[in-house]
Image: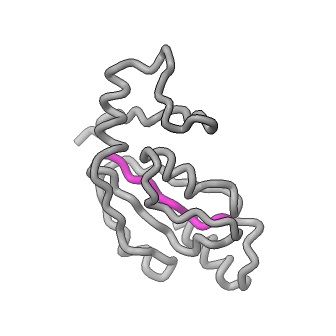
Amino acid sequence: PAMKPHLARPWINVFKPKDLSAPWWTPAHREIAQHVFRGPIAAHPVLVYQTIHRLPELGIPQVCMVGHSNVGKSSLINALVHGKEIARPSATPGRTRHLFVFDLGRELSLVDLPGYGFAKVKPQLQRDWSLLVQA
């Protein structure tokens, strides 16, 4: 089956994150975003490289947050779902050590990946993260 197009909240005003005003943001866009990003959220089990084969095939678009450690990937996920604390942000680089999958109402999946670059962890764990992201 063909996947439906998804229109997420395409911007976040960092000074007023709940401000939804924008002249190009139509009521139809807002309705889709409200449905997807304010709806029920299911968190799937924590995944590591050794258990990546357990990642469910949801048949929905997945958006993965990839980047250096401590750049705000978890905070971005929380902002996209209107401030719900589903991903745990931290001031400590390397705190996200597993792959976290958040299913937004069976419409869209957000994936919080471990960061890379600044985490002070053992080299074996960094190799596992690399394999996890590539899997």
Question: Is residue 52 shown in magenta?
Answer: no
Question: Residue at the spot x=59%, y=33% of the render?
Answer: 13
* Residue in the foreground of this view, choosing between 108 and 57: 108
Residue 50, position as x, y percentages in the image = 48, 82
Residue 131, position as x, y percentages in the image = 59, 72
- Count of marks placed on residues: 0
Question: Residue at the spot x=51%, y=77% of the render?
Answer: 49
Q: Report the side of 18 relative to 126 (left or right).
A: left
Question: Residue at the spot x=33%, y=36% of the render?
Answer: 34
Question: Is residue 110 shown in magenta?
Answer: yes
* Residue in the foreground of this view, choosing between 10 and 2: 10
Q: Quadrant of the N terminus?
A: top left
Residue 135, position as x, y percentages in the image = 51, 67
The quarter of the displayed image where residue 70 is located? bottom right
Q: Report the side of 109 relative to 50 (left or right).
A: left
Q: Report the side of 76 relative to 67 (left or right).
A: left
87 versus 49 height, above or below? above
Farthest residue in the left direction? 1
The quarter of the displayed image where residue 128 is located? bottom right
Q: How is the image coloured?
A: one colour
Question: Residue at the spot x=39%, y=59% of the render?
Answer: 102
* Residue in the foreground of this view, choosing between 37 and 115: 37
Residue 12, position as x, y percentages in the image = 56, 36
95 versus 112 height, above or below? below
State which region is magenta: 107-115
